[in-house]
Each structure stands twice: as C-alpha cells, then as structure tokens.
Image (cartoon, rainbow, N blue to C red):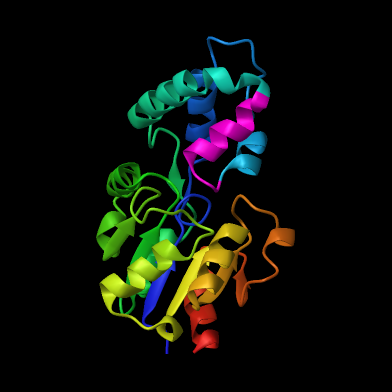
Amino acid sequence: MITLIIFDLDGTLVNSSVDITNSLNYAIEPYELEKMTVEKTVGLVGEGLTMLVEKMLGRENAQIMPDVMERFIRYYSEHLTEFTVPYPGVPETLEKLADYRKAVVSNKREALSKRLLESLKLSHYFDVILGSDSAGEKKPSPKPILQILEMMKVKPDEAVIVGDSNYDIEAGKGAGIKTIAVTYGYRGVEFLGGADGMIDHFPELPSRLEGLA
C-alpha cells in the first residue's frame, strides 16, 4: 500500500521553463553566444544547474562558466516565479491527496526549491523538501530518495515517485520504489518507458495511485 508520494518539482509540479530560459539568457548576455529558447532549455534541464550550464556552454566556453553561473543564480533568485506557475490541477489534486504523506526531491537547490514552493503557496502540502545540495548526490542517483525514506520511516514498497524525466524514474527504481511518469513535462514520452505508470494530466494521479496499490 502506497503511503508516501515523492514529487519532482520542475516539469512535474510547476512549469518554470520561461524563468529558467530568461535567467540563462541574462547569464550569457555579455558574451557572443546564441540566445536560448524555451524549447532548447527544456531539452537540457533535469540534472541540476551545473550540468545545465555545462551543456549550454560546451567545452569551448568552459572558461566563462564561473561568471555565467554567478550571473544565472543572481538573476534567477530575483525572478524565481515571475512566469513560473503550477501545472493545471496541481493545487486541487494535492488537496485530494491529503491522506498521503508527500515530499519533493528536486535537482534544483534546496533553498530555491523551498522559496519557489512557498511563493506559489504549495509548500504546506509537503512534509519534506530536498534539493540538489541536500543529499550529496542528485537524481538519477537513488541517494536522495533513500534519504527521504529514512527520514520519514517509510519502506520502499510503500512509496512512489512522480516525475517527468528518466532521471526520476532511474532514481526511483534504484531506490526500489514505484514510479509514475508525467507526459506533459520537459521530457518526451520516449524517455519514460521504464515507469510503472504514466499520466497525461496531473489530476489523473489519484486514480493512477489506486492502480498501483
């Protein structure tokens, strides 16, 4: 029986793609680099900020990475929820899931994850919120999932992770928990085939959870 739902953040609970894209473009503004589009950004996110900037810059621009990182963090911190919104049905569905314990595991830094959820009035739904700097390793490592299970005294067969990427699925499977993929997020369906279940819209989650029991 599932008692704990672990959620990914970006691409699962919230659409933050515009704010991340705007922050990347501010970060590279002093340099003669091609501007990022939302489409390009969502193709790169998922493994945390360092990997995102590394993939955006490429090896040929590695020398500017420290400055680009600093500029990104400064701008993003000031524009965290300018365009970021919950996906349709997220608050209402979280209300319906009141009988479940809930946590967030994000590859975004913990302080930013908490502040984003607080700004969108979603933080009170979750017992624990972990970020990329919380567990020493990021998804697809199972370490942050295992840390949540230990903190909340929950057995692997009592937990499920809900996320939009293969990193969420791999982390969940590595920790021995069930996995549900959302198809509306940042990763295409072709990356999500290993999940135990899929949903096309967040409000489908309660009925999908019943199917896992």
The residue sitting at the right extreme is 190
Q: Position of residue 171 (x, y in %)?
A: 52, 65
Q: Residue at x 31, y 55 (%)?
A: 122
Query: Horizontal and vertical percent for residue 71?
Result: 42, 21
Toward which corner of the image does residue 41 lie, by quadrant? Answer: top right
Residue 167 image point, x, y percent:
57, 58
Q: Nearer the viewer, residue 157 or 97?
A: 157
**Residue at figure coordinates x 34%, y 31% from the top left:** 77
How far from the left and from the top, in percent, is residue 89?
Answer: 46, 61
Q: How many marks?
A: 0
> From this viewpoint, is residue 93 visible?
no
- In this picture, residue 22 sits left or right of residue 152: right
Residue closer to the observer: 192 or 207: 192
Residue 10 visible? The answer is yes
Q: Residue at x 44, y 40 (%)?
A: 84
Residues shaded magenta: 46-59
Q: State whether residue 61 is above or below residue 108.
A: above
54 vs 12, nearest the viewer: 54
Q: From the viewer's perspective, is residue 60 above or below residue 190?
A: above
143 or 197, nearer to the observer: 143
Q: For the point 33% across and 80% down, which residue is it?
A: 154
Q: Is residue 57 above or below residue 17?
A: above
Residue 185 in magenta stretch: no
